[in-house]
Image (cartoon, helix red, strand yellow):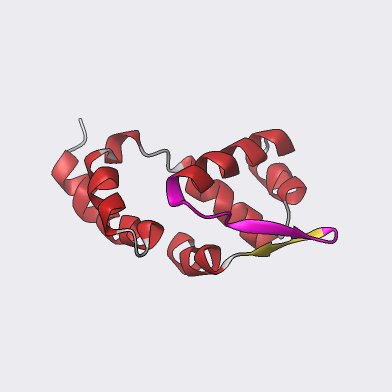
Amino acid sequence: MVDAQRLQRYFTPLLDVIAGEKSWAINSLSMSIPSLDLNLLRVLDAVLTEGGVSRAARRLHVTPSAVSNALARLRTLVGDRLITKKGRGIVPTPRALELAPVLA
């Protein structure tokens, strides 16, 4: 069994970055750490590293639609678009760039 207090100490810095200026979100996120899907953060890291959804999907051995769905769930959690399309590629938002070093 995982100790909830230990998890909270470990993830609070990450949650601070995710929530950014939304201090109210920290409390609600901290309360639901066990339900936080950390795979969403792996997906964002893969998308930012690979520079695209399709390449990230290949790296993660999932379909591009699974990556898109995971990004949609993370966007809802973070309250930011995270990436935008530009031509045939993607451009990370400032929030995604802020998260990138924490994910690596």
Quadrant of res 21:
bottom left
Q: Is residue 88 left or right of residue 102?
A: right
| Residue lying at 34% horizontally and 34% vertically, measured from the top left | 35
Relative depth, front residue between 39 and 21 = 21
- Can see residue 75? yes
Q: Is residue 13 left or right of residue 44?
A: left
Relative depth, front residue between 60 and 18 = 18
On the image, the x and y values in percent for residue 65 come to 70, 34
* 1 lies above or below 101: above
Q: Residue furthest right?
A: 88
Quadrant of res 97:
bottom right
| Residue lying at 64% horizontally and 40% vertically, measured from the top left | 67
Answer whether residue 65 is magenta in the image.
Answer: no
| Residue lying at 43% horizontally and 43% vertically, measured from the top left | 38
Q: Is residue 16 left or right of residue 27?
A: right
On the image, the x and y values in percent for residue 16 come to 31, 60
Quadrant of res 48:
bottom right
| Residue lying at 64% horizontally and 57% vertically, measured from the top left | 83
**Numbered circles on residues, count:** 0
Query: Which residues fall within the magenta stretch?
Result: 77-88
On the image, the x and y values in percent for residue 88 come to 85, 58
Answer whether residue 82 is magenta in the image.
Answer: yes
In which quadrant is the N terminus drawn? top left
On the image, the x and y values in percent for residue 74 come to 50, 45
- Can see residue 63? no
